[in-house]
Amino acid sequence: MALDVVVRSKSHARLLLESTRAREPPGPLGRSVAVKRTVVLAAMLLVVVGCSNKRAPAPENEGAQPAASRAMIGGGTAQAPGAPAPPPPVQGVSSSAATAPGPVAVPTERKVIRNGSLTVVVRALDEALSAIRSATEKAGGYVTNESQDRDTWGVRHGSITCRVPAAALDRTLAEFQSLGKVESVSVTAEDITEQYFNLEIRLRNQQELEKRFRALLDRPGNKVSDLLEIEGQMARVRGEIDELEGRKRFWDSQVSLSTLTVQLHEPNPAIGSARGGILSTLKNAIRELGENFVETVAWLISALGVVIPAGLALWIASVALRAFRRRRGGPR
């Protein structure tokens, strides 16, 4: 199209030049007028050619222009076909896309800590403790604490603490109740779903912050002061992350494993014997009587150390007062 315009412009200029030559006067004056007219026509030809080049678009850009317009209307930026895609923003450095946190998954199950306690009267303490240990291992748990003692009546007592899977708590508790006569039983449940969800959000935010500090630390051109400040902030963030991860592991352990505390004791003897019962109570009473008598005598002896000096001082004062009165002429 530009070539056609140029050809037509040149032909028109040639015809105009020939028509003007026919009318120019002869002699030197005619030659001067012809030179000026030729210069003006050449300038006009150059202007026409330049305008035609500006109006004529390139053929390969005809299909790209609508795409660029559509991209601008859609809110995006126009990109030429075949051009390389812009590099993705570095996470931790950009202030727009890199700082936008991603979605946090909402927990679909409740986080509940379940514990139980049980008090049972058993015939034989050793056999009951052995059965509890076996049942705990069978359920997939373990024993954390165990103790035995004997009271003043000679009755044996025992205590054992077990950790069993939360799913097996009810079944294990029912198995323990079959060991003897149940005196008390209780099961507690603490829902920590909200605290656990908040903990996960805080942990994720601290981890994202640590990634940003790490990206800033790897940035070229950092000063020594900048590096020291970034490392200090990273140490603080890492300490918070370790604390949150430790609490999360503790809650996971409390949720997955339930604590079951069992108190055991043998039945109290109906008839007193040398080991307990009425005779043991009488022996203890006589022993306490002797101890109280000895303590009373000891108290009296210690009190004499105060009473005797005080009484002696009062007697001396009374004698001195009577002697003073006799010298003054008798009592008044």
Image (cartoon, rainbow, N blue to C red):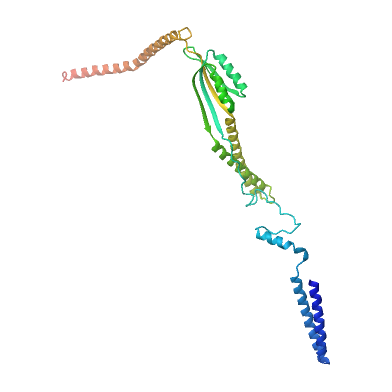
| Image height of 212 relative to 25, above or below | above
Residue nearest the viewer, comparing 99 with 51: 51
- Which residue appears at 62% of the width and 21% of the height? 138
- Indicate the position of residue 251 as horizontal and vertical percent values: 57, 33
In this rendering, position of residue 83 left or right of residue 161: right
- Which residue appears at 56% of the width and 26% of the height? 259
Residue nearest the viewer, comparing 96 with 115: 115
- Indicate the position of residue 116 as horizontal and vertical percent values: 53, 25
In this rendering, position of residue 147 left or right of residue 10: left
Q: Quadrant of the N terminus?
A: bottom right
- Which residue appears at 82% of the width and 83% of the height? 15
| Residue 159 visible from this viewpoint | no
| Image height of 149 relative to 191, above or below | above
- Indicate the position of residue 104 as horizontal and vertical percent values: 60, 43
Q: Please, which residue is most extreme toward the right here?
A: 27
Q: Quadrant of the C terminus?
A: top left
| Image height of 52 relative to 142, above or below | below
In this rendering, position of residue 122 left or right of residue 234: left
Q: Quadrant of residue 207?
A: top right
Q: Quadrant of residue 68?
A: bottom right
Residue nearest the viewer, comparing 226 with 77: 77
- Indicate the position of residue 275 as horizontal and vertical percent values: 48, 9
Residue nearest the viewer, comparing 159 with 280: 159
| Residue 257 visible from this viewpoint | yes
